[in-house]
């Protein structure tokens, strides 16, 4: 195909400036690190990356909805929001352990669960998730510029600025993304610290006195829990993407703990601040009016209301960095999801798919810019539904089947007669890590995904019956005062359905 040949030629010319590697596995020999200093630098980069990614306005935005949308008081918002978010952190951290041992992107490793064909649908859902967050980030960025410019910069201009800046960095590749995110984390943390200091006097008067007349219904509490769970759990669809440069010998518990701690701490930091700001707004008419007029941007600007107006605007503008850093990650990972969906699409360079992704969420943000709360409160929790099923199946596969029934994986692992002396050590290594990552693109040896497909299909009905969104409240959700309980029931169904079918699938097909 002449067009694809031209793209490959262009890629060869710009390789080194932008990342041209697609969904291909990064071989272990490429990831070997012989210097302690280089390894330490890699760890520092990934720590800075997660602080920048999870400690920004994207994470804070969901916590604002506790008081402002779900009518929860300060205490309930803090307790429910943080517990939900912490559970989501565990999900994201567990998914991250697949990165170093595989050298593959998260959705590529998902082929070992879903098979070559169903994983295309899962990749599509994952793309929808990161697109949703990108829309939220772009709208908040537009609101910030709209507010600090006294309405002189239209909302749509701010959205365009966030989108364009995010795309430029996202095309540079994972090494540059990690480095940029590490540097961006510093100013963001400083601004949030200043925000705590600037509003300390407001906290004293409001935090423990703000109570809603309703006190918050059970349904509101359950839905807010699901929303905050989705803040961090949705990272699970891309976490291993950022560990593919780590040596294959990196311990899983090391990756798990780094990811867990580096997501929990910054998200808790901004989450508590978000609940505080929203609680003050519910008691302070001036703050609430600013939120009504300018959205989240107005509320952020109000938090510095006791400081010089020009300096306050400067600080709020710096917070745009956190939105851009989050969109960089979303744009970078979504492009791989598109490549995974088709062999032909995988031949198109990643940076072009990043452009397509960028254009899509730019258009959605422009169209839905006046419906921020609706997008955040209704669309994003739905992404957590499928991810809850995914992590349930992943844990069962790792901790049950590949731990106790590895001898049934006859397609994935060769027999003794098929192993040459040269390949014997490689075979033993595969047995030790319980995955043969060499077959990541071998359709004849990867699982058919029957057990996972059945688990998902069975979970769809229970999700529909137990979800609670603006457009639909299921009969099970109504029993819980309209609370969103879909993810819990989806996990329960997967936990029951997957094991017997997977056992049959392995005995019948050996993969």
Image (tube, grey):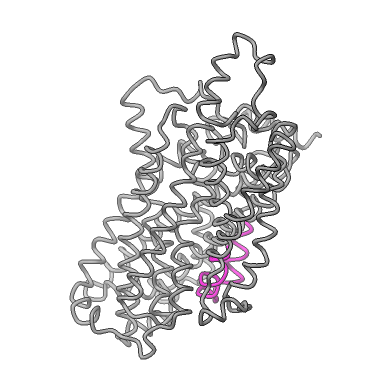
Residue 89 % position (x, y): 41, 54
Asked if residue 362 lies in the magenta stretch, the reply is: yes
Q: Nearer the viewer, residue 117 or 190?
A: 117
| Closest to the observer, 396 or 5 | 396
Please identify the quadrant where the C terminus is shown: top right
Q: Which residues are magenta?
A: 359-382
426 relative to 226, above or below: above
Answer whether residue 433 is magenta in the image. Answer: no
Q: Residue furthest bottom?
A: 213
Main SS, magenta residues = helix
**Residue 41 versus residue 293: which sits nearer the camera?**
41
Q: Extreme top residue here?
A: 421
Q: Position of residue 77 (x, y in %)?
A: 36, 74
Corner quadrant of residue 191: bottom left
Q: Who's the residue at 58% across and 72% down the image?
A: 467
Determine whether, in the image, residue 189 is placed left or right of residue 321. left
For image coordinates 65% across by 14% down, the residue present is 419
> In this image, 329 relative to 206: left or right?
right
Q: Quadrant of the rendered structure where residue 201 is?
A: bottom left
> Residue at position x 51%, y 39% from top?
172
> What residue is rendered at 57% in x and 58% in y?
129
Q: Residue furthest right?
A: 1
Seen in the picture, residue 305 relative to 1 is either above or below; the reply is: below
Total tally of numbered discs in the picture: 0
Q: Quadrant of residue 253?
A: top left
Q: Position of residue 243 (x, y in %)?
A: 46, 37
Horizontal arrangement in the rendering, residue 216 relative to residue 273 (left or right): right
């Amino acid at each position: 195909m002449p067009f694809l040949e031209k793209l490959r030629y262009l890629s060869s010319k710009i390789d080194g400036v932008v990342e041209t590697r697609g969904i291909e596995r990064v071989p272990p020999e490429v990831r070997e690190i012989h210097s302690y200093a280089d390894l330490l630098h890699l760890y520092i980069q990934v720590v800075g990356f997660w602080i920048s990614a999870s400690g920004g306005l994207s994470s804070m935005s969901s916590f604002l909805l506790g008081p402002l949308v779900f009518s929860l008081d300060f205490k309930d918002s803090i307790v429910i929001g943080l517990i939900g978010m912490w559970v989501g952190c565990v999900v994201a951290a567990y998914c991250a352990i697949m990165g170093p041992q595989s050298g593959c992107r998260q959705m590529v490793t998902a082929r070992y669960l879903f098979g070559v064909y169903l994983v295309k649908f899962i990749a599509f859902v994952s793309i929808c998730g990161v697109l949703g967050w990108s829309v939220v980030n772009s709208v908040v960025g537009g609101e910030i510029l709209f507010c600090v410019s006294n309405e002189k910069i239209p909302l749509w201009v701010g959205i365009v600025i966030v989108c364009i800046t995010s795309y430029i960095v996202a095309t540079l590749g994972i090494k540059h993304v990690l480095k940029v995110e590490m540097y961006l984390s510093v100013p963001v943390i400083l601004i949030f610290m200043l925000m705590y200091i600037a509003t300390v006097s407001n906290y004293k008067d409001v935090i423990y006195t703000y109570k809603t007349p309703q006190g918050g219904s059970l349904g509101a509490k359950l839905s807010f829990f699901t929303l905050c769970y989705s803040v961090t759990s949705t990272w699970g669809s891309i976490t291993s993407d950022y560990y593919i440069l780590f040596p294959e010998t990196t311990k899983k518990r090391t990756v798990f703990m780094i990811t867990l701690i580096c997501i929990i701490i910054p998200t808790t930091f901004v989450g508590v601040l978000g609940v505080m700001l929203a609680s003050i707004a519910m008691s302070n008419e001036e703050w609430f009016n600013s939120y009504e007029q300018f959205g989240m941007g107005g509320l952020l600007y109000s938090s510095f209301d006791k400081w010089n107006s020009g300096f306050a605007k400067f600080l709020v503008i710096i917070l745009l960095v956190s939105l851009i850093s989050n969109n960089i990650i979303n744009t970078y990972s979504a492009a791989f999801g598109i490549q995974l969906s088709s062999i032909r699409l995988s031949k198109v360079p990643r940076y072009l798919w990043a452009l397509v992704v960028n254009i899509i969420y730019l258009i959605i943000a422009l169209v839905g810019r006046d419906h921020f709360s609706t997008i955040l409160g209704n669309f994003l929790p739905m992404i957590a539904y499928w991810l809850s099923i995914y992590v349930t199946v992943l844990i069962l596969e790792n901790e049950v089947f590949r731990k106790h029934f590895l001898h049934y994986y006859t397609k994935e692992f060769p027999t003794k007669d098929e192993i040459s002396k040269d390949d014997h050590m490689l075979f033993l290594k595969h047995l030790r890590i319980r995955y043969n990552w060499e077959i990541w693109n071998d359709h004849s040896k990867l699982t058919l995904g029957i057990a996972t497909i059945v688990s998902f299909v069975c979970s769809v009905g229970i999700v529909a019956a137990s979800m609670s969104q603006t457009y639909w409240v299921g009969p099970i959700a109504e029993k819980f005062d309209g609370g969103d309980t879909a993810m819990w029931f989806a996990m329960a169904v997967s936990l029951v359905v997957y094991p017997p079918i997977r056992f049959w699938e392995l005995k019948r097909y050996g993969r």
